[in-house]
Image (cartoon, helix red, strand yellow):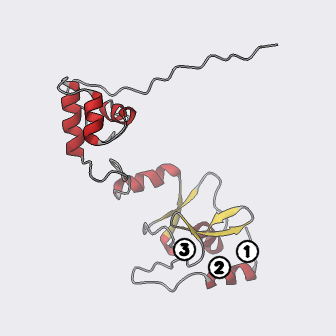
Amino acid sequence: MKYPAPFIERFRAQTSEPDDNGCMLWEGTCDKGYGIAWRNGERYAHRHSWQIANGRIPFGKIVRHKCDVKNCVNPEHLLVGTHADNAKDALERNRYASGSKRRPDITDDIILDARARYHSKQVKLPALAQELNMCKSQVSDIMWGRLWRDVPMPKGVRPRPRRRKLKRDRRKTR
């Protein structure tokens, strides 16, 4: 994709000078940490930056950050890869969320203890829900490994997938 000179000038006007780490930060509009620069259906500033420096992004590939700074648009900090590469990077760099960001008061140890007590029938689900200050369905998902998946289940207990009853189609067929 060929970029016109006016777009490149506007683009560069919205980037900072390189910081100590070499990151050139996007100073324009951001969404969830990523710089936004719309042009021809392309949204993200880091993708534009890579294309200005290197040409088209190959089909089926994404632009990844080496530096883990979402609004960095320095082409030297960007590389092309797959979603699997990106997920592998996040796992290696410990960037995946574990547990719950909404409930930092609930630790892995609390979940382990609650699962052990529930599965040994020492405590029932409503009591656990009240103790953890959560609704029963959420506590059930925790007890059966649908939430807090990274916390191991008690010995001899296997995680259960969520079972939903299929709704019968009540429309008349013609």
Task: Residue under label 1, please give it.
Answer: 3
The quadrant where residue 49 appears: bottom right
Which quadrant of the figure contains the C terminus? Answer: top right
Q: Which mark is residue 73?
A: 3
Callout 3–callout 1 Cβ contact below 8 Å: no
Q: Is residue 149 above or below residue 60?
A: above
Between discs 2 and 3, the one toward the N terminus: 2
Residue 140: x, y in percent?
A: 34, 31
Say which of 128 and 151 sits in front.
128
Q: Earlier in the sequence, mark 3 or mark 1?
A: 1
Few, some or many residues within 10 Å of mark 2 (<14, 14–19, 20+): some
Q: Nearer the viewer, residue 86 or 25?
A: 25
User: Which image quadrant: the N terminus?
Assistant: bottom right
Q: CA distance from mark 3 to mark 1?
A: 16 Å
Contact (Cβ within 8 Å) of mark 2 with mark 1: yes
User: Gap between marks 2 and 1, in whole Å?
Assistant: 11 Å
For numbered disc 2, what is the local secondary structure? helix
Query: Which residue position is annotated with label 2?
Result: 11
**Amino acid bearing label 3:** Val
Identity, as a three-letter code, of the amino acid under mark 1:
Tyr
In the image, 100: left or right of 105? right
